[in-house]
């Protein structure tokens, strides 16, 4: 249960992280991905879906709401990934196909749910023993259709997004983007495994074959879907943070921190302008980039004055990486 709560909090954190950009730019696609996903995850929580079913007077309607919301979120998720990594001249056909697939899947999902309700698999009567009904546990072809539609659609989207992320990963210049989209690809892979487990469970419920594995598959699905939400939420937050990391010169501050011990060991008094140039002070300065440049100059000048004997191979690699931060 703790990983389920953590995954819900992670998705809501993604919503909050994109709220500012959404307001400033009067729209943000990642925000509109995260919001329905967060609502779906919240509704799916055992303490919430019972309240929703009871409040709306229709046991099982929480499954309809959460399923529709998560399918909408995945449809927008695919659009967001396509817009982020695919060339503009190649986006239109992919986005149009995705919109048609999402519309068709949600339509089939809702119609199948309605048919299952009409057939009595999802009862509209609120008796004390049915207020917490799980429609996905009913052996009915209508239930199987709406649950399998949900699973197959999300498997298809997850595979497509994972392939797009992996394809474009080597072309991404920013390390944060690479880590972020790598996490998204892992999350989508985990989602496929979770949804396959869910689909197998639905086949077991419908056919009564392999009932001993039903609870295991449901538990696997619950754990993997929570893990998937954590990876995807984390992955989508990282690229959004790249602008802030650049503005705050986080990498330059990190390089100063790494250089401090080398600076103290190698620098000589006659090349130091003043004590303000100490790298450790530069970490908390307003202009760490200038401090990094000064620290590198002092280290290299000191090594030059000593005839190139101060820096070993490890030190030289550290200096070279730090120089790279100035030209990134």
Image (cartoon, rainbow, N blue to C red):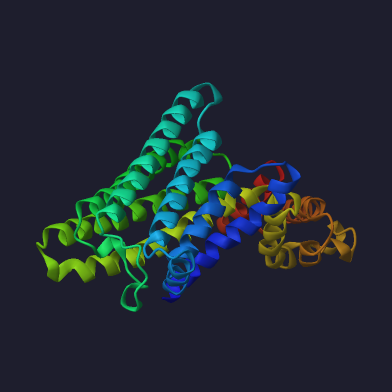
Residue at x 32%, y 73% (from the top left corner): 130
Which of 12/300 is in front? 12
Q: Is residue 199 left or right of residue 177?
A: left
Which of 158/310 is in front? 158
Give the quadrant of the N terminus: bottom left
Q: Position of residue 230 (x, y in %)?
A: 47, 61
Q: Position of residue 127 (x, y in %)?
A: 34, 74
Using the rendered view, name the quadrant where residue 210 is placed. Answer: bottom left
Decide: is 284 above or below 100: below
Residue pushed farthest bottom?
128
Q: Is residue 56 left or right of residue 201?
A: right
Decide: is 80 above or below 276: above
Residue pushed farthest left?
209
Decide: is 173 above or below 17: above
Q: Position of residue 261 (x, y in %)?
A: 69, 68
Residue at x 29%, y 53% (from the top left corner): 118
Q: Is residue 294 left or right of residue 205?
A: right
Residue pushed farthest top?
89
Q: Position of residue 201 (x, y in %)?
A: 21, 60
Give the quadrant of the C terminus: top right
Which of 128/225 is in front? 128
Count the marks: 0
Using the rendered view, name the quadrant where residue 75 is placed. Answer: top left
Residue at x 52%, y 35% (from the top left corner): 85
Which of 267/6 is in front? 6
């Amino acid at each position: 249960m703790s990983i389920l709560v953590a995954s819900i909090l992670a998705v809501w954190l993604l919503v909050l992280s994109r709220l500012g950009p959404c307001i400033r730019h009067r729209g943000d696609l990642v925000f509109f991905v995260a919001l329905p996903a967060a609502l779906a995850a919240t509704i799916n929580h055992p303490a919430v879906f019972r309240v929703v079913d009871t409040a709306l007077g229709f046991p099982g309607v929480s499954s309809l709401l959460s399923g529709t919301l998560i399918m909408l979120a995945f449809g927008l998720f695919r659009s967001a990934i396509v817009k982020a990594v695919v060339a503009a001249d190649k986006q239109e056909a992919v986005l149009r196909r995705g919109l048609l697939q999402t519309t068709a899947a949600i339509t089939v999902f809702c119609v199948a749910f309605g048919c299952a309700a009409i057939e009595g698999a999802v009862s509209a009567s609120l008796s004390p023993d049915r207020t917490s009904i799980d429609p996905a546990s009913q052996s009915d072809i209508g239930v199987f259709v709406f649950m399998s539609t949900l699973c197959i659609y999300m498997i298809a989207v997850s595979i497509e997004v994972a392939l797009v992320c992996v394809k474009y990963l080597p072309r991404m210049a920013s390390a944060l983007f690479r880590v972020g989209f790598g996490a998204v690809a892992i999350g989508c892979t985990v989602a496929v495994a979770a949804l396959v487990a869910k689909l197998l469970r639905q086949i077991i419920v419908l056919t009564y074959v392999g009932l001993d594995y039903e609870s295991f598959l449901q538990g696997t699905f619950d754990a993997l879907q929570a893990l998937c939400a954590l990876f995807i939420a984390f992955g989508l937050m990282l690229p959004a943070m790249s602008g802030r990391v650049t503005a705050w010169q986080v990498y330059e501050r990190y390089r100063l921190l790494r250089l401090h011990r080398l600076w103290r060991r190698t620098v000589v008094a006659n090349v130091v302008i003043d004590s303000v140039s100490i790298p450790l002070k530069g970490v908390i300065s307003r202009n760490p980039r200038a401090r990094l440049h000064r620290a590198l100059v002092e280290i290299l000048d000191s090594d030059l004055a000593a005839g190139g004997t101060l820096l070993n191979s490890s030190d030289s690699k550290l200096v070279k990486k730090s120089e790279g931060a100035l030209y990134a």
